[in-house]
Image (cartoon, grey):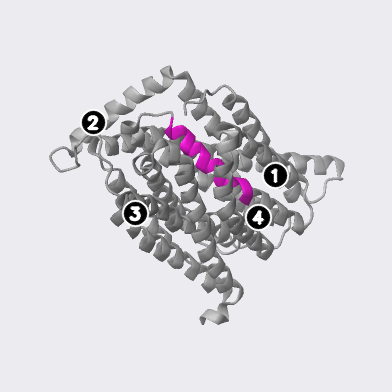
């Protein structure tokens, strides 16, 4: 029992470790620093497009390799080893952001892409270990515990980073710019140190009895390819899993895109960056208790109905985001996002884990994360393309009619509106998924 408890907490503490990257880097300072430091003097819409396409490239690379590396990990019972490899790849590339000078936007994008690959690749194997650390009747809770600790851990470091940036003299730093760079370095240290707990406490999953070694490494790769093909056929024949994965792909697009692009969007419509950072802090600390509460709600509503409730709130968030004008409205949206973001992620993960065979969890979660990454391709790219197309059309309208003002702001609002389709289509398909609990 004690070993099982340590494995659960070791698994959940990885979310505590890597959420610092999601908050400080992906959602917080990277979009701001990318726009003002690495894209200094560049048009706001152009920097938004560069960030959107950078996120899309990272997600595409992860999506293409996810099922294969998941299958190899299953074949060799090396899910934890792959988790740690990708985690420390992310740690090292995050640390490199500290050294990139002003104006070098392309180098910044490259390091960011590698860091996202590390972050996302590790999450494949983190998710795939869930069936091995929690029985089916505990998975909603354990999955929620991971996300809740992620909000708390990521929020605490983010709070420290915000203080570093707003009060650099408290930390003997000469400028806000230097404080942001040291914030990137602190994320790498936090991520690397707390990843030691899953490395020590979580046992390697065992289903096949095989282990990766030099004599069977290439056989494992070939077997992985074969297993991917077999699993694709099985998924294609399983209407229920196929429906869920497609639904998940659609609605998680909107969720991930809001996470990645919220700060950039807020800046594009004229909000001060300090307001946006404060709102992100609110999301983190609301998210900690709300995630546990939302997963508890599933006991009464059922897991799928709770996911529907979260999607409905995201539709409200998107609609509000399109029309908001005042900074206090961004704070309200931050609270709403904090109430449901961890819940929809945790319940989707635990719901899917009940639909798949445990011995193939790495491979099946490879497909799960592949779709999540394709979502993170389509979502940011959809916003980027919508912004650029809307901007072009508005420029033409302005030339011919002379009555369109603040083109960049209007184009950004058009970009966020495109997410409504994703939430609606995902919810529509989820209706047809049958519970297997």
Q: CA distance from mark 4 to mark 1?
A: 27 Å
Residue plotted at (55% across, 47% down): 342
Residues tagged 4 and 2 counted as in contact (Cβ below 8 A): no
Check disc 1 and report the residue beneath it: 317
Check disc 3 and report the residue beneath it: 6
Nearest to N terminus: mark 3 or mark 4:
3
As displayed, is residue 260 above or below residue 429? below
Whether residue 20 sits left or right of residue 331 in the image: it is left
Question: Of 262 and 397, which appears nearest the observer?
Answer: 262
Residues tagged 2 and 3 counted as in contact (Cβ below 8 A): no
Outermost residue on the front side: it is 1
Whether residue 307 sits left or right of residue 193 in the image: it is right
Check disc 4 and report the residue beneath it: 43
Q: Nearer the viewer, mark 4 or mark 2?
A: 2
- Dot 3: within a 10 Å radius of its alpha carbon, few (fewer than 14), some, or many (20 or more) residues? some
What label does residue 290 carry, if any? none
Residues tagged 1 and 2 counted as in contact (Cβ below 8 A): no
Q: Nearer the viewer, mark 1 or mark 2?
A: 1
């Amino acid at each position: 029992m004690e070993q099982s408890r340590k494995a659960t907490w070791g698994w959940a503490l990885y979310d505590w470790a890597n959420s610092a990257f999601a908050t400080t880097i992906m959602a917080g300072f990277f979009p701001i620093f990318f726009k003002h430091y690495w894209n200094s003097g560049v048009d706001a819409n152009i920097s938004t497009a560069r960030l959107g396409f950078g996120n899309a490239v990272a997600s595409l690379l992860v999506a293409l390799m996810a099922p294969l590396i998941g299958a190899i990990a299953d074949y060799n019972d090396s899910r934890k080893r792959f988790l740690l490899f990708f985690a420390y790849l992310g740690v090292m590339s995050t640390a490199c952001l500290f050294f990139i000078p002003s104006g070098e936007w392309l180098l910044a994008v490259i390091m960011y892409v590698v860091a996202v690959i590390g972050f996302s690749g590790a999450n494949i194997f983190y998710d795939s270990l869930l069936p091995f650390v929690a029985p089916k009747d505990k998975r909603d809770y354990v999955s929620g515990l991971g996300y809740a600790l992620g909000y708390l851990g990521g929020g605490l470091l983010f709070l420290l980073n915000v203080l570093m940036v707003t009060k650099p003299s408290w930390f003997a730093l000469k400028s806000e710019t230097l404080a942001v760079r040291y914030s990137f370095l602190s994320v790498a240290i936090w991520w690397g140190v707390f990843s030691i707990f899953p490395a020590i406490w979580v046992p390697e999953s065992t289903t096949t009895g095989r282990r990766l070694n030099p004599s069977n490494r290439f056989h494992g790769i070939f077997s992985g390819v074969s297993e991917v093909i077999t699993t694709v056929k099985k998924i294609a024949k399983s209407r229920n899993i196929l429906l869920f994965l497609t639904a998940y792909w659609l609605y998680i697009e909107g969720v991930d895109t809001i996470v990645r692009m919220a700060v950039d969007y807020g800046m594009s419509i004229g909000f001060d960056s300090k307001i946006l950072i404060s709102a992100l802090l609110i999301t983190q600390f609301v998210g900690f208790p709300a995630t546990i509460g939302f997963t508890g709600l599933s006991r009464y509503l059922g897991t799928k109905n709770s996911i529907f409730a979260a999607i409905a709130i995201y539709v409200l968030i998107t609609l509000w985001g399109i029309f908001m004008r005042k900074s206090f409205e961004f704070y309200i949206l931050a609270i709403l996002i904090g109430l449901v973001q961890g819940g929809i992620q945790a319940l989707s993960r635990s719901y899917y884990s009940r639909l798949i065979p445990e011995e193939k969890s790495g491979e099946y979660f490879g497909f799960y994360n592949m779709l999540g990454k394709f979502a993170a391709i389509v979502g940011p790219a959809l916003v980027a393309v919508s912004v650029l197309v809307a901007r072009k059309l508005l420029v033409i309208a302005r030339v011919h009619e002379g009555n369109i003002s603040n083109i960049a702001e209007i184009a950004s609002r058009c970009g966020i509106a495109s997410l409504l389709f994703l939430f609606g289509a995902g919810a529509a398909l989820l209706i047809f998924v049958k519970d297997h609990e």
